[in-house]
């Protein structure tokens, strides 16, 4: 079995049908979770347990990628939608029993506000921040910076809109065509409707995270080494670090 196949097999087994359907409709979404885990894997290992906060754990796809990336790591997974978080709790109960995972049902901003300054090594997320209103996201990013330890990293696999608006529109049109092509033969017009309706939210002026604006915003809050590491059409992996205090 190849490494990719065993990764897929593990996710299909633990997360079940949700993972399989998401992989079909939006392969970039599951790939971004994998990439988030891959970045955490390369984060320097220490004797102390790495403290990771996950924003928007959903059904547990990104959470599992994080938990699989390193053994000496604890994840606090935050999601304010109980129906989603209950599924993650069900899928990932073994990791809770092992003391490697805990959950918080607050919204991201409230949860972050409860954390102390400079206390967390990594804050990771996939496909969550693009759902935030711009004004709410701004406050969340400020809190992320405050809560991260110096040298700590923010890792986000998400929808980062292309700077070229015409290219972006074309990519979204391709995305919509893809939903129809995949979901119509499966007779899943219920899922098709949900995805199209949700897309209007994602693309609205008060939500959209355009790459240049997002990078400038991170810079403004004090992040350094801000990078877009991978881009898959409208999706990208962003990493950024909190600087060490100058000597
Ligand atoms: C698209 S899902 C992504 C789940 C998972 N990371 C993945 O990639 O499969 C986004 C999740 O963010 C959660 N979410 C949205 N807004 C949130 C907020 N303000 N605070 C916490 N969680 C939020 C939703 O409930 C949902 O479970």
Image: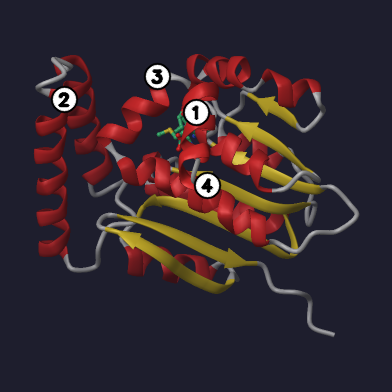
Q: Mark 1 or mark 3, which is nearer to you?
A: 3
Q: Position of residue 53 (x, y in %)?
A: 67, 43
Q: Position of residue 190 (x, y in %)?
A: 19, 15
> Circle 3 is placed at which residue position?
17
**Can residue 138 be spotted in the picture?**
no
Q: Position of residue 1 (x, y in %)?
A: 50, 40
Q: CA distance from mark 2 to mark 1?
A: 22 Å
What residue is rendered at 39% in x and 19% in y?
A: 17
Q: CA distance from mark 1 to mark 4?
A: 25 Å
> Circle 2 is placed at which residue position?
183
What residue is rendered at 78% in x and 53% in y?
A: 117
Q: Secondary structure at mark 4?
A: helix
Q: Nearer the viewer, residue 141 or 190?
A: 190
Q: Mark 1 or mark 4, which is nearer to you?
A: 4
> Circle 1 is placed at which residue position?
58
Q: Is mark 1 within 8 Å of ligand 1?
A: yes
Q: Which mark is residue 3?
A: 4
The structure's colour scheme is secondary structure
Q: CA distance from mark 1 to mark 3?
A: 14 Å
- Looking at the image, the residue that sits furthest to the front is 1
Q: Is mark 2 within 8 Å of ligand 1?
A: no
Of pointers 2 and 1, the one earlier in the residue sequence: 1
Q: CA distance from mark 2 to mark 4?
A: 28 Å
Of pointers 2 and 4, the one earlier in the residue sequence: 4
Q: CA distance from mark 2 to mark 3?
A: 15 Å
Picture quarter with the C terminus: bottom right
């Amino acid at each position: 079995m190849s490494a990719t196949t065993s990764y897929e097999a593990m996710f299909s087994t633990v997360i079940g049908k949700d993972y399989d359907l998401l992989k079909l409709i939006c392969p970039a979404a599951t790939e971004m979770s994998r990439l988030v885990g891959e970045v955490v894997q390369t984060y320097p290992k220490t004797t102390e347990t790495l403290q990771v906060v996950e924003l928007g754990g959903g059904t547990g796809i990104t959470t599992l990628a994080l938990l699989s990336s390193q053994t000496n790591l604890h994840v606090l997974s935050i999601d304010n939608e109980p129906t989603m978080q209950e599924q993650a709790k069900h899928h990932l109960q073994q990791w809770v029993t092992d003391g490697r995972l805990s959950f918080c049902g607050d919204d991201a901003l409230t949860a972050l506000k409860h954390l102390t300054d400079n206390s967390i090594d990594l804050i990771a997320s996939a496909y969550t921040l693009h759902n935030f209103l711009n004004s709410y996201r701004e406050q969340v990013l400020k809190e992320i910076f405050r809560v991260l330890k110096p040298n700590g990293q923010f890792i986000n696999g998400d929808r980062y809109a292309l700077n070229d608006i015409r290219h972006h529109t074309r990519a979204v049109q391709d995305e919509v065509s893809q939903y129809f092509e995949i979901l119509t033969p499966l007779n899943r017009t219920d899922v098709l409707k949900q995805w199209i309706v949700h897309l209007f939210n994602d693309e609205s002026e008060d939500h959209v995270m355009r790459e240049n604006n997002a990078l400038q915003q991170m810079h403004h809050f004090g992040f350094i080494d801000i990078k877009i590491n991978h881009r898959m059409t409208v999706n990208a992996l962003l990493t950024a670090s909190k600087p060490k205090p100058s000597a």
